[in-house]
Amino acid sequence: MHCPRVSGLAGGVLVSFVTVSAWAAPEFTRLDIAVAPEPIALAAHDFDGDGDLDLAVVNATAPAGLSILLNDGHAHFTISVHYPLPAGMTEPTDVVGADFDGDGDIDLAETVAYAGGTNFSVVRLFTNSGGNFAQTQVQVGYGPNCIVTGDINGDTRPDLATANYLANGWTMLFNNGVGGFTASTRIIQPNPRAINLGDIDGDGDLDVVLTWLHGMVVGFNSGAGLFPTGDLYNFGLRPDSIALVDFDRDGDLDLAITDYVDETLYIFGNNGAGAFSISTSYTVQIGPTDVRAVDLNSDNAPDLLMVSTNTNQVEVRMNDGTGGYDYSLLYAVGAVPVEVVAADFNADGLLDIVTANSAGGTITVLASGGGCVADLNHDSLLDFFDVAAFLAAFSSHDPSVDFTRDGVFDFFDVAAYLGLFSAGCD
């Protein structure tokens, strides 16, 4: 059960399309980084104010909780601090970031499915002050498994919305401006799995889309954070993650939804008034979760990212410039990836990809462009120490030096590295 984010091209940003006759497939360099056990959720923000994007990582296994990973500016991350769950709490599920208290830095909200009592679940709030996070809690519906943020009631403050799997509904948390929240819960359909926000009907406020056991619910915002009307759609076997973006260039938000069981990516077209119909669907890799809409190749057309939990891959569906996604690219990552984020972590102007690998205790960084691939010790020099680093990584079968991306460590990887080393760095 993995959750989209209201950021980037997902969650309510309209996209202007430029039709292109050809596009270049993005190339990435892989690095696996050990984190706390069973990482299951990610959020990317600049927590320490140094100008690059860091990571918040939720991990489900002891010491379950939340880790802050700081970026060195080259998309290499180190755990700065870990916040374990308080005594009696278990089952952290998701995290999202925004400036909840209006002080100019990024705060965090983490969902916790069990917080020490019957039908008791919380959003665990982390208020950032100079990189130090003070913690508070607010109660939500039982079993929250997904959280998103946006201005739901139109007061310019970032609110929160959770999908509550065991409570069969959603909770809206309205921000009081200083980081406190008031909860409003609605009961809808059984076992909601993911939630997202976007202006679906074009009236200027954020509506809600929620996937449940056999389809999705679309709720229309009254403008004050109330949802008196909505539509129910039945499809698929287990619809999961949701991305909102204008795929067909008609000025309204469409939907991309993964189905974990029937291994399908559904594309829903919006009629302009918030009514949806399936425009096309694609068979994807086994166990797809966490679809994201991002422009990977800078052609102003949103591509789609998914992770395949069964094949240990990121699947990229490249937009053909007209809203079609027939062409698929696959990138190997760590064991059982469950969530993915895309952002420019190494400040080269291109998007990088990070996955949370729940079975491996790692995150995988797929760094695109920028930097010098042959500079393995990241000191901006090419010398003996880089060769030594390559030999050590090659001997241990480190995926970061599998330059041919075939899962085999052989002469071709050595030749590829020597070629990169000989080419030098700009």
Image (tube, rainbow, N blue to C red):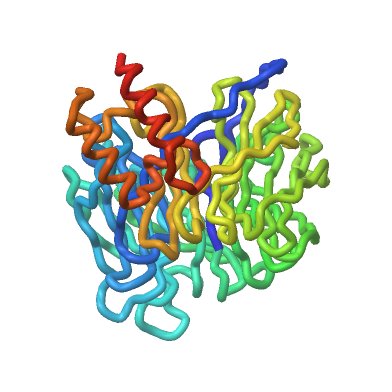
In the foreground, 354 or 43: 354
Q: In the orientation shown, which residue stands out farthest toward the front?
A: 411
Say which quadrant the N terminus sits in.
Answer: bottom right
Residue pictured at 42% horizontal, 35% vertical: 29
Task: Please say whether residue 58 is visible from this viewpoint.
Answer: yes
Image position of 232 with respect to 12: above or below: below
Nearer to us in this view, 192 or 418: 418
Residue 63 pos. (x, y %): 27, 70
- Count of numbered circles in the view: 0
Report the residue at 35% width, 55% height from top. 57
Residue at the image position 41 percent from the left and 35 percent from the top: 367
- Judge from the rendering whether residue 10 lies leftward or rightward of residue 274; answer left or right: left
| Quadrant where the C terminus is found in the figure | top left
Residue 17 shown left or right of residue 76 in the figure: right
Residue 69 position, x and y percent, is 27, 48
Height in image: 426 above or below 28?
above
Counting from the top left corner in percent of width and height, residue 196 is at 58, 50
Q: Is residue 49 visible?
A: no
Residue 203 drawn above or below residue 408 = above
* Residue at 41%, 77% in the rendered image: 114
Q: Residue 169: which quarter of the image? A: bottom right
Q: Position of residue 340 (x, y in %)?
A: 49, 48
